[in-house]
Image: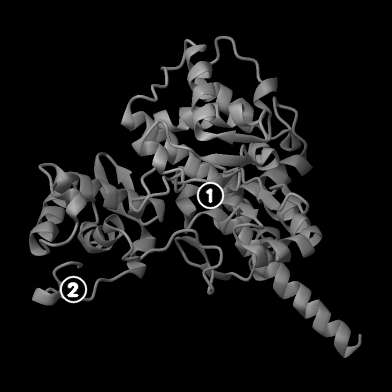
Amino acid sequence: MSSLANQLAVAERDEVTRGIRLLLARPLLTEQDDPAAFDLVRRRREPLTRWFDYTVGWPLVVEARQGYARLSKVRSYGTGAAGPRPARRRRSGRAPLDRRRYVLLCVACAELLSVPVTTVGLLADRVVRAMSADEALDGFDTAQRSERMAFVDVLRLLESYGALTVLDGATESYGESADAKVLYRVQPGVLMRLLAAPGSPSRIAGGEQRFDELLAALAQERRYGGDGDTSAAQRTLWLRHTVLRRLFDDPVVHRDELSTDQLAYLTSLTGRQVLRRAAEQAGFVLEERAEGWLLADPDALATDEKFPDDASNDKVAALLLLDTVAAAPQGCAPARLAREAEAILDRFPGWGKAYRSEDGATRLAEDAVRVLARFGLVRHADGLVVARPAAARYRLRGIESHSDRKNAP
């Protein structure tokens, strides 16, 4: 092979490696949001599609003309999984969407599919009519500021996805006045791809099924068989995909979080080879410990969330409370963590203003524990917070607390 061919092969491998990690962090990647990243994914769509299909069974769709790439990540929740990752409001606090906002999001998406261009007022009117016509939904009252702010959170989220483009005005102005003028262009292709599910909601029978049953039907993947009709090849495929989904999607995976069959596959000669090859192709550093596995991205391209991170109060508190949890092998009671959080607030009076209320210390401790659970560092057992083996990676060495550092731990 010539020197030029070698260089081209290395360049393609490096770009595919980078593309894998970019899509893991941003499953919906738009040209408008990141032109360079989208161009890379567009050029390497074929090897990227093959890698995701073989390794984790996630379909990748790249629409070059419409300017987006969508990786449909189907998560495999199991024992000890890091848990759901909710959509978050596009505000400084990045609070997760609540039930009301999810309802507004679904209704707004349905109404947007039929219009190429709209205004915030016209869209709000359509949502009002749609929700009033469905007895299962509470009405949408645009006269209430809290309702308008919830709608603003939904629209800004759709903007961040590239499903809406502001042509004139500012979405935030609708929160202050129902008469605000904001003009949008709708991207129907992106809207249609927002739902990452193997099944179509329109093909699921309703009737008397509970919500969890409907959700399970929506997430069912027929490629693995089902209803007792599963071949050995389908079973092996299911094991490979479910195990590698966990490893590529969660910060850390402990052995006791896997089923007996999953653990047997991952510790087999074939499973180890598949994992190591996949990690190398994606540019991850694989750490194998007695307690489990961790895939580290040295360039942090695949990282959608960091820890430690001083960007938010709950993550700072999580790091400060982690030593307390780790020092109690049998588990730490939430009340004790609340007292520790109260001591942190007392020590740094200029910090954590959102938690300066009667129950602020309790809320801070709860938010910090949620952060630790999300990163696989703690688990809940019998009402206690118990440190996971991965927590040993972190040690707090000290906190500056003199007068000129009171605003942040």
The quarter in which the C terminus is drawn is: bottom left
First in sequence: mark 2 vs mark 1: 1
| Nearer-the-camera pick, 161 or 247 | 161
- Could you tell me residue 362's position as x and y percent? 17, 45
- Could you tell me residue 394's position as x and y percent? 32, 69
Q: Residue at x 47, y 10 (%)?
A: 135
Q: Residue at x 77, y 36 (%)?
A: 231
Quadrant housing residue 345? bottom left
Left-right relation of 26 to 44: left
Disc 2 designates what residue?
399
Q: Nearer the viewer, mark 2 or mark 1?
A: 1
Residue 128, can we see it?
yes
Quadrant housing residue 189? top right
Q: Residue furthest right?
A: 1
| Nearer-the-camera pick, 352 or 111 | 111
Q: Secondary structure at mark 1?
A: helix
Left-right relation of 203 to 97: right
Quadrant housing residue 163? top right
- Could you tell me residue 98's position as x and y percent? 39, 34
**Disc 1 residue type (three-letter):** Ser
Q: Secondary structure at mark 2?
A: loop
**Image mark for residue 160:** 1
Q: Residue at x 43, y 40 (%)?
A: 153
- Could you tell me residue 143's position as x and y percent? 35, 24
10 Å crowding of disc 2: few (<14), some (14-19), many (20+): few
**Disc 2 residue type (three-letter):** Ile
The quarter in which the N terminus is drawn is: bottom right
Q: Residue furthest bottom?
A: 3
